[in-house]
Amino acid sequence: MAFTGVCTKELCQMRDDIAYYQNVNAQVLGISVDSPFVQIKFKADQNLNFPLLSDFNKEASRAYDCLYEEFTMGLRGVSKRSAFVVDKEGVIRYAEVLESAGDLPNFEAINRTLESLN
């Protein structure tokens, strides 16, 4: 969810570490159930240097089994904070789906996985 504290922290860390991801030949994508219009505003406000994709219809979130059917404050259909590493053949090499929206992905484990693919 764009503009929330943890989401902003997570994506700004990705922004700040983009050189690392480029050096390991990785493409960073951010995906949420926010509308494309919210994504455009959030990306501009945070100076994000990678694509943000809208899963407004929740197809990707359901396919990757990372959707809260019921979230806090009566919200429904919110993506869980998740991280995936998908290799060039489309095989998921790392998957982390967090139950607590306040937690950040394990960036060290993600980086180890990326390094093992090179």
Image (cartoon, helix red, strand yellow):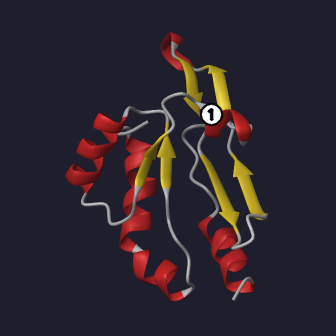
Q: Nearer the viewer, residue 84 or 16?
A: 84
Q: Nearer the viewer, residue 2 or 13?
A: 2
- Residue 44 seen in render: yes
Q: On the picture, is 55 further left or further right than 93?
A: left
Quarter holding the N terminus is top left
- Residue 3 seen in render: no
Residue 56, x across and y down, in percent: 48, 30
Residue at point 56%, 76% (across, down): 26
Q: On the picture, is 15 further left or further right than 115?
A: left
Q: Quadrant of residue 15?
A: bottom left
- Please give the residue where the numbered disc 1 appears in the rendered image: 59
Q: Quadrant of residue 115?
A: bottom right
Q: With respect to residue 51, does 25 lie above or below?
A: below
Residue at point 27%, 45% (across, down): 40
Q: On the picture, is 25 further left or further right than 8?
A: right
Residue 107, x across and y down, in percent: 60, 67
Q: Amino acid at mark 1?
A: Glu
Residue at point 50%, 66% (across, down): 28
Extreme top residue here?
74
